Image: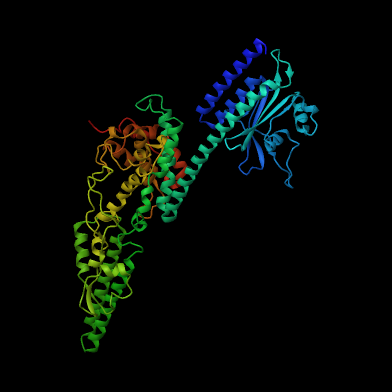
Amino acid sequence: MSDAAGAHRVTGYRRLIELGIALSAERRFTRLMEMILRGAKELTNADGGTIYLVSDDGRELTFAIVLNDTLGIALGGTTGAPVPFGPVPLRDKQGAPNYKNVAAAAALRGETINLPDAYNAPGFDFSGTRAFDERNRYRSQSFLTVPLKNHDAEVVGVLQLINARSEAGVTMPFSIDIVPFIEALAGQAAVALDNQMLIDAQKNLFRAILRVFAGAIDAKSPYTGGHCHRVPELTNMLARAADAATDGPLADFHLNEDEWYELEVAGGLHDCGKVTTREFVADKATKLETIYNRIHEIRTRFEVVKRDVEIAYLRGVLAGGDEAALRAARDARLVELDDDFAFVGECNIGGEAMAPEKVARLERIAAVTWRRTLDDRLGLSWEESARQPERKETPPVVEHLLADKPAHLLAHDAAPLTPDNPWGFVIKPPPHKANLGELHNLSIRRGTLTEEERYHINDHIVQTIMMLEALPFPKNLRRVPEWAGGHHEKMDGSGYPRGLTRDQMSIPARIMMIADIFEALSARDRPYKARKTLSECVEIMASMSRERHIDPDLFELFLKAGVYKEYAGLFLLPDQIDEVDLRRYLGSLHPAA
């Protein structure tokens, strides 16, 4: 071997080692393929090259990247330009192997094919290559086609180089001496590609699991399910606006590729604890709603009382009483009962705050009695029977029109967390047993949820954090619990469950907080509240910003960058989208000194 040849070989080994190190470090799939092809072209001084990948079903080779220096072609890879060539079938319709195509033959045989001249290559069909050459005034001559085999010796793709060139730029066959280098590079490349494909497959699997999980919540409750899809979208929009900021307090905020994926996972799992929330609590549209709206039971009782009034009137007439006076008393009482039931129905909606005089009226209505003649312990499940106190009375029994019974008290599902729990939360214990009492629920001061039900709703974030921190996340996802578990905190430390302040929370967690609140305010599909317009949502959140509940810098960016408008165009109904006067808010969102 001459000194020049030896030096060339040493240079080749050195470059091969460098490429191997680079390939093992590269994590972007498109960049990885481009690095492989450019490295092979450099080692062989080839004019062009292609990387094919075996399709998922193993039936064909698809073009992943195509480069040609003379023709100025750069397709696929990091260019983003699609490769316009159709796939190469590995077998025909009858299942016979396609040995006529050189790339398919290399893949099928698992062997390198070195052709000095494609136009003089018996057994191979280069008619497509000839047609390409004619259209582009090019001459495809020497071909070096190498299968890419992973660590299991499975072919995952094909590396094809075209037209080796001498130092003078003259096309020549690929040297036999260079083939071992390219095969070695192909082996390293195949393992790197296979590893990256496995990583991408795992990510895609995890993304699919997130979608399935959100779909499961969607099936359980279409309202919270939509929330689980929309919050990650809005989180991503605001995070991209923050990442693009070039000045102001967010100018230094940037996420790398791993962190974007981490944010995607956190967004997808931010409400995973809702699988533990009873849907009739999460979607409680009226105060008396459980599995169904119990207003129907109360309506029936009113009907019974009205029937009793009618019966009392008829008995009075039969007993010889003053028919006119009895009729007037009956009619007045029926009107009163109708009015009382209309009031109970109004209270059940929960649209307005319950003033003390309304609660007092409910208590007066509740004092009305009716007579039950059937045993209310018949036909019960064992759990309902266990809630019934021991009673000796037998029907008929006089009962109140609205009742808070011992049977309405439900035990909590699990023991509450204590301050010494392993997750470090300092959480108030449940206020008391869940209370389904009719008077208790109808007397709710605002909204449709009791104090116990609000506790149960809030508990979903505790369950979310517990579920996420129980998962063995890899290093690049270690912040998912923190990012996903902080969206019910507040900047002033009065939030839930940890009582974190602004400085104790990361920017992604604060971003998710804004996304969660804005989605909930603007949601068009909640059964328990009327839809709000865009300007109403912005006004509410502006107040929250001034009250140190949400991050004012992020909310100002939310407005300035038009994130609110972009989101509205995608997810709000046309009648919700109105004009927002940004002049009212920009520069005035920070708390007053």
Indicate left or right for 118 with 320 as reference.
right
The quarter of the picture where residue 469 lies is top left
Q: Say above or below: 318 vs 420.
A: below
- Is residue 578 visible in the rendered image? The answer is no
Q: Give the residue at x 30% y 49%.
A: 458
Q: Say above or below: 208 vs 315.
A: above
Q: Give the residue at x 21% y 73%.
A: 390
Report the front residue among 407 and 564: 407
Q: Give the residue at x 27% y 82%.
A: 311
Indicate left or right for 162 with 569 as reference.
right
The quarter of the picture where residue 67 lies is top right
- Is residue 122 visible in the rendered image? The answer is yes
Which x, y percent locates residue 82?
62, 33
Report the front residue among 61 and 407: 61
Q: Say above or below: 323 vs 92.
A: below
Which x, y percent locates residue 573?
45, 47
Report the front residue among 109 and 445: 109
Looking at this rendering, what residue extends furthest in the front direction? 1
Tell how many labels: 0
Report the front residue among 228 and 526: 228
Q: Give the residue at x 63% y 14%.
A: 8
Colour convention of the picture: rainbow
Quarter of the picture containing the C terminus is top left
The quarter of the picture where residue 517 lies is top left
Which x, y percent locates residue 435?
25, 61
Which x, y percent locates residue 331?
26, 76
Quarter of the picture containing the N terminus is top right
